[in-house]
Amino acid sequence: MAGQKKRKVRKKFLHRMKIKLTGVFAIVLVGFIVVLCRLVYIEQVKGEEYEMRILSQQRYDSITIPYRRGDILDRNGTELATSTKVYNLIIEPKIILAEGSKEVELENGEKTTKQELVISALKTYFGLTDEEIHAALEDKDSLYKIMARKLPYDVVVPYNEYLETKNGRYIVGVWLEDEYQRYYPYSTLACQVLGFTASGNVGNSGIELYYNEELNGIEGRQYGYLTSDQTLQRTIREPRNGYSVVTTLDTNIQMIVEKQIAEFMAETGALNVSVLAMDPNNGEILAMANSYTFDCNQPYNKEYFYYQFANPDGSYSFTRMVQPTAETPPEGNGENAEGEPQPAEPIPTVISAPSGEELVNQMSDEEQLDALNKLWRNYIISDSFEPGSTFKPFTVAAGLEEDVIHDGDSFPCDGHYTVIEDERPVNCHLLSGHGTVTVEGAIMQSCNCALMQIVQKEGASVFYKYEKAFGFGARTYVDLPGEVNTAGLFYTEEGLNPMELATTSFGQGQNVSMIQLCTGFCSLINGGNYYQPHIMKQIINENGDVITSYEPTVLRRTISEDTSGLLKEYLYQAVENGTGKRVRLEGYSIGGKTGTAEKLPRGNEKYVISFIGFAPVEKPKIVLYVVVDEPKEADQSHSGASSLLAHDIFQEVLPYMNVFQSNTSVDDGSPVVDEAAIPVQGETEPESGTSEENSTSENGTPNETEPGNGEGTPEGNSQEPVQE
């Protein structure tokens, strides 16, 4: 009995102990978890703060470790912009002075001090003078002194090799800091599209500006501090390099376009030539070029902006607005309504020089900066102009889609058309008239009279609805900075009175940008899908992993596939047998439309000549838009400048794109009937403020086309020369 009692007491004791042990274990576990959570909190949230506290109790210097800015690549991986490594020469006077007095034995048996060895190396390998070195060493407590910046690799190689020798191992307090310098392998290629960078990795214009945040990385930091025994310790936080932007550009197409532009400028010349190539099936920009260029590696080189001031005789001049003086009193400077003197108005003064360099010397800093901004400006997205007859396909498409006209309908043309009874008629470009033309013939022969009759059937409401659908009067929001806002350069529905409606139907009286018209045109010939134009294809990290990928999205439907099919056939006939015959290329099916717009003031014989086309007609792979501003021809309106340039570009681009010859048509030798921009009679100027927004570019600068008072145009449609 006694034994049984003892066993029961023991069991009870063990049970109590288990409970106590479990409780103690739980308390320890909870405490461990609390400590662990606290450590994680300190590391993740307070780590940097405590690190700085510790370092603040020691003598230290901190320096940033630069990140590498991401590359800009074309669609095939070709580098268009990259960052090359350069080196800054750094010395640490505190270390050199602390260690410098120690004597060392050289390879040749001679003895010297570490400080003397350091000074000798700095003079030998980096060309520093005794004065520069001793001046730097006077800052005795410094651990970071820049002695030379942006040294190329070939300069630092001999020094690095020296460090591997017996003598070089004694070098203290000298090291090379990595830095990156932006480099553009093709210098001027796609310069306005790429842009350039200023100091500090700040993008300036183009892709460099628009994708600046993605291209830039995060700087690292290196902390160096001396312990109590004068040992240098370093703590390094590595940088995160920037992402690379893979663009939709094709370097080969861009080169072909720029080469052909250069040849055209050398043979014919113009105020400006711009070319835009797009893939109509997804809105990708394949090439974008202007005749004026600059070297992205030397964006401030003023030699590139001399073209703005060149005169035919080889001299240079520009107009400066100056305040009148006693010797040059202003004309008409009388009194205001209250009898007070009118303030003096600036008067234009022509500044001339025999050479561009001498002209620049006479320009103020502000005038030079203005000239540079015009050089960097991308005409294709930042400027607007009257499109002329390249607008006609949009008017026809609206009529077909709304079923107010049909394939095969015909319209009379006797050289002019009376829009409003008892008012002067509006001329066709062919004053003798086209006779009776079908809808197809209206596009082929570019008949103004037929277009005015078509738009009358549509009415202002339908016409305006399709203007908006095709993106006119609004930004495309292409992913490039500085896009012009043409809202103030387009009639509202209420402003489309009979005369304005008639003249707008064939592209006179309202302004467009090249990117705007080309994007809308892509939807005309791709089945009616309106894609947002874009230049970015992918954003990738340094390992090639995709961070962001642009997926083409149909923003809206503009027309049906049936209407698109008719338009493609009409535009094909315009090249085969109409005003676009100069573009015809043997063996290839090309469609397109010419345009001729006279600049304001009317009657000045200055024209913007354009052509927009696509190939192949069956399944378009490329849309090409060529605009020539004031070709240097005696008869600009009949020069066919844009068509000839488009022909030459197509001739090289189509084989490169593996577009095979699909027909055997050849030029029949018949003459081309050029369309001329005839001054339109009876237009009226709409009221001020024809739309919701003023005409300014996205970066806040005014458009190149300043508000004017040209007859029959919306406010702001002055059509001033592009470069003036």
Image: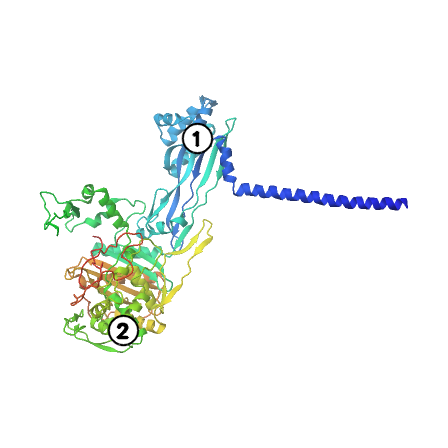
Which x, y percent locates residue 266?
A: 22, 54
- The part of the image, by quadrant, that contains residue 95 is top left
Which x, y percent locates residue 461?
A: 28, 70
Residue indicated by mark 2? 458
Q: Amino acid at mark 1?
A: Leu
- For marks 1 and 2, give the CA distance: 78 Å
Residue indicated by mark 1? 143
Whether residue 600 sits left or right of residue 566 in the image: it is left
- Indicate whether 299 appears above or below 506: above
Q: Which mark is residue 557?
A: none
Viewer-side label of 1, 2: 2
- The part of the image, by quadrant, that contains residue 19 is top right
> Circle 1: is it few (<14), some (14-19), or many (20+) Cα within 10 Å?
many
Q: Earlier in the sequence, mark 1 or mark 2?
A: 1
Residue 158 in view: yes
The image's colour scheme reads: rainbow
* Front residue of this view, candidates 660 and 136: 136
Circle 1 — which element? Answer: loop
Which x, y percent locates residue 383?
A: 26, 56
> Circle 2: is it few (<14), some (14-19), or many (20+) Cα within 10 Å?
many
Q: Amino acid at mark 2?
A: Glu
- Indicate whether 688 appears above or below 395: above
Residue 650 in view: no
Q: Tell which residue pokes out farthest to the front in this image.
A: 338
